[in-house]
Amino acid sequence: MCRAARRASRARRGLQGWKIHAEYPGDCSGLASLWWRLLYFQWRAREPGSRAVPCHAHAPKITQFAPYQSLKFESISVEAFSFRNDQYVVFAQPFIGKCGFLEWDHVEMNFRNFDDINSTSTVICKPLIIDNQLFIIVAQLFGGSHIYKRDTSANKFIKLQGIDVLKIRKPNDVETFRIDGESFFVIADSSKAGSTTIYKWNGNGFYSHQSLHPWYRDTDVEYLEISSKPHLILSSSSQRPVIYQWNKATKHFDRRTDIPEMEDVYAVKHFQVKSDLYICLTRFIGDSKVMRWDGALFRELQTMPSRGSMVFQPFTVGSWQYAILGSDYSFTQVYRWDAKKGEFVRFQELNIQAPRAFSPVSIDNRQFLLASSFKGKTQIYKHLVIDLSN
């Protein structure tokens, strides 16, 4: 038992030392940290002069991400998806060259191996479901990128087609989306000679639909809707993030504007709180930022100190909105949205080596956070909730 857990145990028995860890109840286990938060509420209720009422009157819920399962491989991307009423997870594993698929074991209550797609220097394994068919876009640094299809009768993946190596030379991100009932995916290419390209499904395969600004070494592409209109945001190492808007007449994306004073942005991810649209902008050097759409442009809302960050991922678990800021040089920071303040507040630290991607998944009334690690073991965390009204 770790020191914090022993302290929590003694405090539960004697209800002493409530003020310890009151400001930030972090420790070596998610459960012990949850107990410190619980004791803090009890202490506040009993503190002389406090207007706090008993816990059951407030009925708050305390949450925490606790280590659940450690996977013995490095990974650079992770995607969770549902196919034919089953939940799956796929990790891109560049060092051993494969897309590794996991499924949930309903008996052992953990994730187990399901299938693999062997590849070379794999950076992205992106699932795409069209008309109850599962496709996997396998982006590789060498040997070209390919698209696989799940053959349900043979219970295996088969190669469907290759992707143009003249346009996609160094893929760095893949995004899927649907517009007016049609399915697309876009690959951000980070080489000098490549071109970020949109591909469209024609019923039999995927073909090149549109190429966007070549020569800019794009690192990330994000699909989102702004004022109910489809948009793309491209991040690159040579210019500020560029916003493209869908043109219904030409069925292409037209350049709309860029995000001013935001150089060196590695990636952009969006989220919504009620009707408000926000984006998280990742910077490897400098400050990462949260920006809010005001109806005309994105305006800065919040700044997060970051060093060595390559992922700033917003996500929701139930009714909670989180954002997680990875780092190659320090602890990964988890933030939770504070509705009263209208911004993120620091919530928890996680120890992940060189995190590259995160993905939430819900299975059997359990919520998990999948965390890819480029230099260490891939991690799975469970989202714990304690209802103080009980």
Image (cartoon, rainbow, N blue to C red):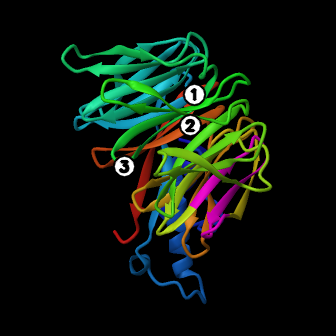
Q: Pointer 2 and pointer 1: residues touching (CB < 8 Å)?
A: yes
Q: Please tell me which residue lies in front, 248 or 238.
A: 248
Cα gap from disc 2 to disc 1, whole angstroms: 7 Å
Q: Which residues are magenta?
A: 278-297
Q: In the rendered image, is residue 15 in sight?
A: no
Residue 82 in the magenta stretch? The answer is no
Give x and y (percent) for residue 274.
Answer: 46, 69
Task: Answer with mark 2 or mark 1, whichever residue precedes in sequence.
Answer: 1
Of tags 3 and 1, which is closer to the observer? 3
Residue at image point 52% right, 84% down: 52
Identify the mark at residue 357; answer none if there is no mark: 2
Pointer 3 residue: 180
Does 204 sit above or below residue 176?
Answer: above
Amino acid type for the residue under numbered disc 3: Asp
Left or right of 96? Residue 260 is right
Does 120 sit above or below residue 242?
Answer: above
Could you say whether the residue bearing mark 2 is in a helix, strand or loop?
strand
Amino acid type for the residue under numbered disc 2: Ala
Give x and y (percent) for residue 382.
Answer: 43, 44
Task: Answer with mark 2 or mark 3, whichever residue precedes in sequence.
Answer: 3
Pointer 1 residue: 76
